[in-house]
Image (cartoon, rainbow, N blue to C red):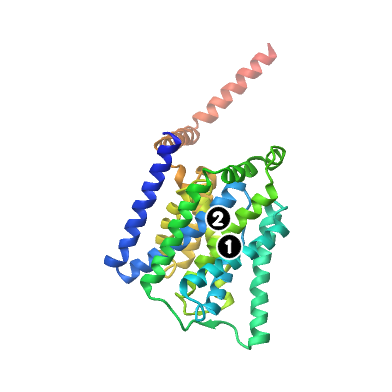
Amino acid sequence: MTERQLLIRDLLVLFGLTGWALSLPYYGSEFMVSMALTCLMYVALSSSWGLFCGSTRYLSLATSAFFGIGAYTSALSLEKFGWVQSIAMVAGIATVVAVVMGAAVLHLRGTYFAVLTFGMTELIRHAITYFEKQVTGTVGRVLTVVPERDTIYLTVLVLAAGTVALSIGVRRTRFGLALMGIGADEQRAQTLGVNTRLIKIAGFAMTAAVAGAVGAAMSVRWTYIDPHTVFNPFIGFQTVLIALIGGAITLWGPLIAAVVFSLLAETLRLKAPQVYMMSLGLLLILSVLYLPGGLASLRAETFKGWWRDTRDWAKDLKRELSGEKAREEARLKKRAKEQYLV
């Protein structure tokens, strides 16, 4: 397929999925809408995370920081400003924080960058908690102005669809090519004239804007928020897991994994939370070992390869249990010994 055909295909798929999700509140139950809302949240978070981190290979654990900033800023500004204005302002604040944070830590890579982003997330959470206790005398905010369910759902749907559309567009621009070049070989990208520092900060800020806007839109589901809830590291970790298992470098991988994880979450988290966490770990291990490209890389050839590997493994196991393998090794050793004596 040509580049134009791929673009048309991606846009048609996005349009179809958005139309289906748009009609869900009209025929779905409250449980279905709630599950779809969680799914859309992680579609937006993991797609934006994959767009930057999947392309550049920078492992950021700061998603929960921007999500929490968005939720807290929305709680403070929603009563004074409108719904749309509040979300737009939150996205701007998260972008500014990301620019400052990125300028400080984006010169690092690997474990150092991941640990520092997680540490800065915890620093922001504890700083807000300290400010709340010492200045306001309380911890948390009660949201007195809460939009209707359909308004919240439509907002998160727009954010999710907009993030996927942004990913479709950015991957076809020079900016997206620069992000891919940084992930492939950052020094070579610098040699070719790419301002890698500016590109990394811009990409990091882009993911932060999405996370902040999603945090603002989702905060009204709780009506009462505190730092422990909205700065929950599990939000950031699950975003990373969804992107990695789905295929962080792919377009549709995070969306596919978000649906899978949302179904697992609603099915297992309340009834068997330990099983849910083990399922996350098992999916990550299997993905790293047998599907490094994520769920989006599944093809018919992948299943054929797994079948061949399983068949060969079964044959080797059968030979080993029957003793045929040991006898063959003994014959080879005996033959080598005879040749050596001759």
Residue 23 seen in this snapshot? yes
User: Which residue sits at x=53%, y=49%?
Assistant: 248
Could you tell me residue 101's position as x and y percent?
68, 62
Q: Is residue 287 above or below residue 140?
A: above
Could you tell me residue 138's position as x and y percent?
60, 87
Kindly indicate whether the residue at mark 2 contacts the one at mark 1 (C-beta within 8 angstroms): yes
Residue 2 lies in what quarter of the image?
Answer: top left
Q: Quadrant of the N terminus?
A: top left
Q: Is residue 102 above or below residue 273?
A: above
Residue 337 lies in what quarter of the image?
Answer: top right
Residue 17 lies in what quarter of the image?
Answer: bottom left
Q: Which residue is more in the foreground, 322 or 142?
A: 142
Residue 63 - label: 1
- Kindly state the secondary structure of the residue where label 1 is placed: helix
Local packing at callout 2 (Cα closer than 10 Å; few below 14, some 14-19, many 20+) is: many
In the picture as drawn, the residue positioned furthest to the top comes out as: 342
User: Which residue sits at x=50%, y=62%?
Assistant: 277
- Kindly state the secondary structure of the residue where label 2 is placed: helix
Could you tell me residue 117's position as x and y percent?
66, 61
Question: Marks 1 and 2, Cα distance to the nearest angstrom?
Answer: 8 Å
Task: Name which residue type carries label 1.
Answer: Thr
Write down the residue under mark 2: 49
Could you tell me residue 197's position as x and y percent?
70, 50
Residue 247 seen in this snapshot? no
Q: Is residue 158 above or below residue 7?
A: below
Task: Name which residue type carries label 2.
Answer: Trp
Q: Is residue 102 above or below residue 271?
A: above
Residue 281 - label: none
Q: Which residue is more in the foreground, 279 or 20?
A: 20
Which callout, 1 or 2, points at the residue further toward the start of the chain? 2
